[in-house]
Every structure is written in C-alpha cells, then in structure tokens.
Image (spheres, rainbow, N blue to C red):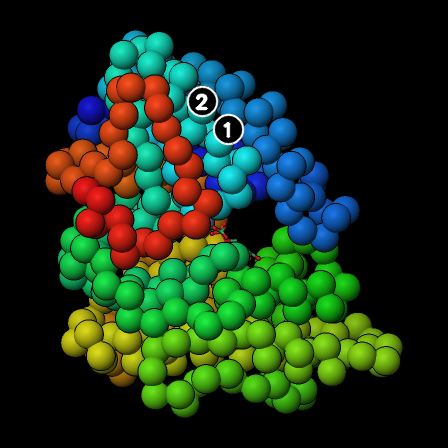
Amino acid sequence: MRILGIETSCDETGVALYDGRHGLLGHALYSQARLHAEYGGVVPELASRDHVRRLLPLTRGLLEQSGCPLEQLTAVAYTEGPGLAGALLVGAATAHGLASALGIPALGVHHLEAHLLSPLLSRPAPAFPFVALLVSGGHTQLMRVAGVGEYELLGETLDDAAGEAFDKTAKLLGLGYPGGPALARLAASGTPGRFSLPRPMIASGNLDFSFSGLKTAVLTAVKGRALGEAARADLAAEIQAAIVEVLAAKAFAALAHAGLGQLVVAGGVGANLALRARLAAGAPRCGARVFYPELEFCTDNGAMIAFAAALRLESRATNHESRSGAFTVRPRWNLETVAAQA
Ligand code: KG4
Ligand code: ZN
C-alpha cells in the first residue's frame, strides 16, 4: 500500500506519501497565509486559485524527493470535506485525475477524521478507545473514539470554534492573520488576570462550548481605548487563558464522562503551548495521558489525509472509493455520519 495524500480544504496545500510497511515517506506543505494576510482572513476564490498553482508542482517535488515514481502509488487520498467548496474541488479533481490515469482508486477523506487520527502517527501512540478534543479554525468538538469510523459526539461549540475565537480576538487586538499563533506570541509576554474575561459555559454541566461572548467581551475591553504594548500583551494573555481554561475543563470532564484515561488533542489550536501546559498540569490528577500529533501535523497537512486513508483501507472501512471518475466534495460534512457511510 502506497498512498498519496492531498489536503486542500482551506489555505494550506499539503501532500504526503504514506507506505503501509515503511510509514510516512515524505510530505510537503505550502501555506497561503501570506496571500490572505492583507485581507485579514481566507479569501475562498484566492485560495482555490492558489491550490491550482501549487498542487501539481508540490506533488511532483514530493515524489522526486521520496524517490517514488507515480507508478508505485496504489491509491490517491484527498480531503472530501468539510472545507471551502472551491478549494476542496481542486484537491478532489487532481486526485481523481491522477487516480484515473494510473488506474488506482481515489479515496475521499473526512478532514476532521484525519485530524483526530493524526496522533496515531506519533510514538507513543494512543490506543482505542480515547477521547479526542478537536480544536481547529472551524470546529471545536469532543468525541469518543472507539475505533476507525467509530465516533460519538460528546459535545461541541454552539457558536464560534476555539481557533475562530483566537483569530477574531487577535484581529480586535490589531494582530495579523492567522491570529492564533500571533496572539499566542503576544500572550507570552503578558500576564493573565489583569483584565477580566468570562470563561463561557465552564460550569454549564455539559460538554458544549461557546466562544462568541468572549469576542464581545474583548471588543468591550478595547473599544475607544488606546492600549499600550504591555496592556495588549496582558489582554492577549487573558484571552488565551480564558480559551485554554474552558477547553481543558471540558476535556477533563469528557474523560470522566466517558470513563477513559487517554485524551487526544488534534487541530490547529492543539499547537498552542499554553493549552499543552494546562492539559499536562491537569492530567495526572485525572490519571490521564495526553497525546498530540507532531507539531508540524497539528495544522492542516497532507500526511494526516494519506494516513487516515491507510487506516481506513487497513480496516476495510473506506468510505468513498471511486474508480468511475465521478466525485463530489462535501463543504459541510458531519463526522458522526462517516462511519455509517463506510
Ligand atoms: O486545523 P487548522 O490548521 O485548520 C482548520 O481546519 O481550521 O487550524 C487552524 C486554526 C486557526 O484558527 C489558527 O489560528 C489556530 O488553528 N492556531 C492556533 C495556533 N496555531 C494555529 N491557535 C492558538 N495557538 C496556536 N499556536
Ligand atoms: Zn484542519
């Protein structure tokens, strides 16, 4: 089994090669962050066009560097959804074109499934069952994961995602796009507690989240005030603390609820070091272990797509295998329905 994985759901063009026997052979990523920075967020049409420009050269370079001729591929996996429709179409069309020319299957992969399985690429890897905290720019969910394709939603955000909360509050602080890493950098020189922000739904008694109130509270804190550099850093630190505290509290509550001792954290916000420190500090008290993907695979990448397809092939639970050339993308796609479609 040798799978080419293609990720184009948002503003990252990612490709990777996963081999059933030798593991990950190589991966390459092109980030469009600079392209979108001047607009303060991802512009869908620009994203699609840039994927068109980058995807084939990136793939060619990866195959060359890995010493893998096209003929050695046994499948091409791509992100089928959720994501930006036009961006998804570029990856899907490329994957189906390549697969059809090579006479091999094209496999559609759920982007969030790929995120939540990505820690299994690391050593030590978690074992099923575990609780997954999925924290990206578009999603914030707690899942009970019993196996490949066995996902039970325990809780999710009712409005903004955690990454979105980072991005939107960063914008209010005048930080560039993407806001999460920029806010985290500023927070490193600040002190939480000097500003006072809510910890939304921390005591709600369920496993759901809400981050839109936080954005409003930050807007109130900055409105009509010229904050100095130290105050901006303190506010950034308080924003980060608020998001991190809620995520950690709910993640530990989910472990207790599910009666499990392994927490997997996946998605872009999983790269946040304050979140990692908080989870590491709280884990021993719950007798829990926390697992992450490699830092480079926290944000969108092709490796997690190739790997998720490989796990599905191994467990014979492939969802969208197609040799016919017909395909769809799913800009909105609920992860819990993936298993049913296996
Ligand atoms: O998983 P991802 O790359 O793309 C989506 O599928 O959304 O996640 C991107 C999100 C963005 O909101 C970004 O600001 C956030 O992850 N992010 C971070 C950090 N690195 C990325 N948020 C906080 N701290 C970070 N270090
Ligand atoms: Zn993602």
Q: Is residue 283 left or right of residue 221?
A: left
Residue hosting label 2: 94
Residue drawn 19% across the image and 74% down it: 258
Where residue 10 appears, as percent x and y from the top left, is: 53, 43
Quote the CA–CA distance across marks 2 and 1: 6 Å
> Circle 1 — which element?
helix
Where residue 255 appears, as percent x and y from the top left, is: 25, 75
- Could you tell me if the residues under marks 2 and 1 are in contact, i.e. CB atoms within 8 Å? yes
Amino acid type, label 1: Val
Residue hosting label 1: 90
Q: Is residue 328 left or right of residue 175?
A: left
- Observer-nearest of 210 and 54: 210
Amino acid type, label 2: Thr
Q: Is residue 317 left or right of residue 277?
A: left
Where residue 160 appears, as percent x and y from the top left, is: 53, 67
Please determine whether, in this image, residue 53 is positioned above or below residue 168: above
> Circle 2 — which element?
helix
Residue 4 visible somewhere in the drawing: no
Mark 1 crowdedness (10 Å alpha carbons): few <14, some 14-19, many ≥20: many
